[in-house]
């Protein structure tokens, strides 16, 4: 390498950088990348300037591009070993290069990485490979999540890294670590870039991350409908593990409403069976109204044991439910739903107690213990737990020291909570929801704009125009199908993912 200072040619000083227009920035960074690509690959593997290591000289937050060149080249060289060889200590968790990689993923310049998307994604995939090989998947979670958030603060454009991260969370059993990603709305998928001026450049000020996370950006590998379904299924399992039933139900519904060519996938079958059970836990109707009707019929036909179980649950017969659960034990076990089925059994007792308020204003604890088949000692603790978690709006009272304890219901308002406090919570929740709804509305506008520039929409509009020209004037107006049903429905709606 003739002149090592070339590594510092980009970015320019901050004052000059801020004066660059998007097109000037784009031209400068592409020229810089072209220069670096002309450097001998062994220079990056050696990673040294004289006696100094490049990774100690370069600043990952400023010189992100050459830093990644060195990092990826050295990692690739170390991983390119015979399959039976163990990983070098340098790249294992705790090793120097591993630490450099973790630091980089938490500090890189996201604007620069938009131009080196494939390499950026590959080092994340290499990190995942390393931690899996060493049996320490949890070590990679924070660096990868930091990288995802730096590249897309909204986390709203689905990428292959989303699925990789959630898989690692499950492998590590770190369900809580998955929530910062799962709790964000997915508003876009990588789509084909329509070049139409300066605003389409990677460095442009895009309203949504879908503007620069495209199919050609390299920031995501190609994703399929199955990848999306797996992501939401793993997400649903995460919420189930944390007993957040409504969130789990929503994720399962995302899978069931996936566009399909009248054929149900195995992931959809798994999602439906879990959805049926979860719907009982959230006291919702167990008949799914959305999705492709032909697909839903096939799912129901393949899940008759679950529908039968729910029917028994709704009957309120605890003895019959217990027998039904024992009869289908092999089915629940094979589908990995045994734990969820047991939750259903426990929930039936909770629903029974809650429904007592429809008949009684108060009931002796001894009677409740008999009704739900619990000992007098255990029933008080059980009922208090239901009250504490907010499921039951009631209180356990003892009118006098000699009197028996009773369960007194308080109606349908918030459990033992002052009205002002309840209103504060409702207002806070409403404010958060309004903000999320506004964000979704903005993303919908952006998606509509992208749709109007897509090839499919242009072809559809041409077809509309042709139909208008060929309409019969004697009918007193145009007679055309203005819905998307007119478009070829044999095309896989997820084909572009």
Image: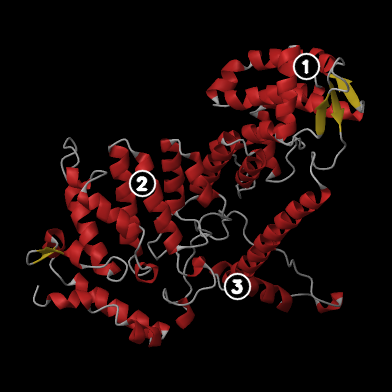
Q: Give residue 384's position: percent from left, percent from top.
A: 73, 27
Tag 1, which secondary structure?
Answer: loop
First in sequence, mark 2 or 3: give its number: 2
Number of the label disc, if any, that sits on residue 372: 1
Residues tagged 2 and 3 counted as in contact (Cβ below 8 A) = no
Q: Which residue is mark 2?
A: 140
Specify how the rendered protein is coloured.
secondary structure
Q: Give residue 74's position: percent from left, percent from top.
A: 18, 55
- Quadrant (top left/top right/bottom left/bottom right) for the N terminus: bottom left
First in sequence, mark 2 or 1: give its number: 2
Of residue 487 and residue 215, the one placed in the foreground of this image is 215
Of residue 304 and residue 203, the one placed in the foreground of this image is 203
Please name which of the two marks, 3 or 1, marks the residue nearer to the observer. Answer: 1
Tag 2, which secondary structure?
Answer: helix
Alpha-carbon distance for marks 2 and 1? 46 Å
Of residue 27 and residue 301, the one placed in the foreground of this image is 27
Name the residue rendered at 75%, 32% in the picture.
Answer: 387
Q: Give residue 2's position: percent from left, percent from top.
A: 8, 76
Name the residue rendered at 55%, 61% in the picture.
Answer: 188
On the question of residue 128 being in view, the answer is yes
Q: Which residue is mark 3?
A: 449
Left or right, residue 115 beside residue 247: left
First in sequence, mark 3 or 1: give its number: 1
Alpha-carbon distance for marks 3 and 1? 57 Å
């Amino acid at each position: 390498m003739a002149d090592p200072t070339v590594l510092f040619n980009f970015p320019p000083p901050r004052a000059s950088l801020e004066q660059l227009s998007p097109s000037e920035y784009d031209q400068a960074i592409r020229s810089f990348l072209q220069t670096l690509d002309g450097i001998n690959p062994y220079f990056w593997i050696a990673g040294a300037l004289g006696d100094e290591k490049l990774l100690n000289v370069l600043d990952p937050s400023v010189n992100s591009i050459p830093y990644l060149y060195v990092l990826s080249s050295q990692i690739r060289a170390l991983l390119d070993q015979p399959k039976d060889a163990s990983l070098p200590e340098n790249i294992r968790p705790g090793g120097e290069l591993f630490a450099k990689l973790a630091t980089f993923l938490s500090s890189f310049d996201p604007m620069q990485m938009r131009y080196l998307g494939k390499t950026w994604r590959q080092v994340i995939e290499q990190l995942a490979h390393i931690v899996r090989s060493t049996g320490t998947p949890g070590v990679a979670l924070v660096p990868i999540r930091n990288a995802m958030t730096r590249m897309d603060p909204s986390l709203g454009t689905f990428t292959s890294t989303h699925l990789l991260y959630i898989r690692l969370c499950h492998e590590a059993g770190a369900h809580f670590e998955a929530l910062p990603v799962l709790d964000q709305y997915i508003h876009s998928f990588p789509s084909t870039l329509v070049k139409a001026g300066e605003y389409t450049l990677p460095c442009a000020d895009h309203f949504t991350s879908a503007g620069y996370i495209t199919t050609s950006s390299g920031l995501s590998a190609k994703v399929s409908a199955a990848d999306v379904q797996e992501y939401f299924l793993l997400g649903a399992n995460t919420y189930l593990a944390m007993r957040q039933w409504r969130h789990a139900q929503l994720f399962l519904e995302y899978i069931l409403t996936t566009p399909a060519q009248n054929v149900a996938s195995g992931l959809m079958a798994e999602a439906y069976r879990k959805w049926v059970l979860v719907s009982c836990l959230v006291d919702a109707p167990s008949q799914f109204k959305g999705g492709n009707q032909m697909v839903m019929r096939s799912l129901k036909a393949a899940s008759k044991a679950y529908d039968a179980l729910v029917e028994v649950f709704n009957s309120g017969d605890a003895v019959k439910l217990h027998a039904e659960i024992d009869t289908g034990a092999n089915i629940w076990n094979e589908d990995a739903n045994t734990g969820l089925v047991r939750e259903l059994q426990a929930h039936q007792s909770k629903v029974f107690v809650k429904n007592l308020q429809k008949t009684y204003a108060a009931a002796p604890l001894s009677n409740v213990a008999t009704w739900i088949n619990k000992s007098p000692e255990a029933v008080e603790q059980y009922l208090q737990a239901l009250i504490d978690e907010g499921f039951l709006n009631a209180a356990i009272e003892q009118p006098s020291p000699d009197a028996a304890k009773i369960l007194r219901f308080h109606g349908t308002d918030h459990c033992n909570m002052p009205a002002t406090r309840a209103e504060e919570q409702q207002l806070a929740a409403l404010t958060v929801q309004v903000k999320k709804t506004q964000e979704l509305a903005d993303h919908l506008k952006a998606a509509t704009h992208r749709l109007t520039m897509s090839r499919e929409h242009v072809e559809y509009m041409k077809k509309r125009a042709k139909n208008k020209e060929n309409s019969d004037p004697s009918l007193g107006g145009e007679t055309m199908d203005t819905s998307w049903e007119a478009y070829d429905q044999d095309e896989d709606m997820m084909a572009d993912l």
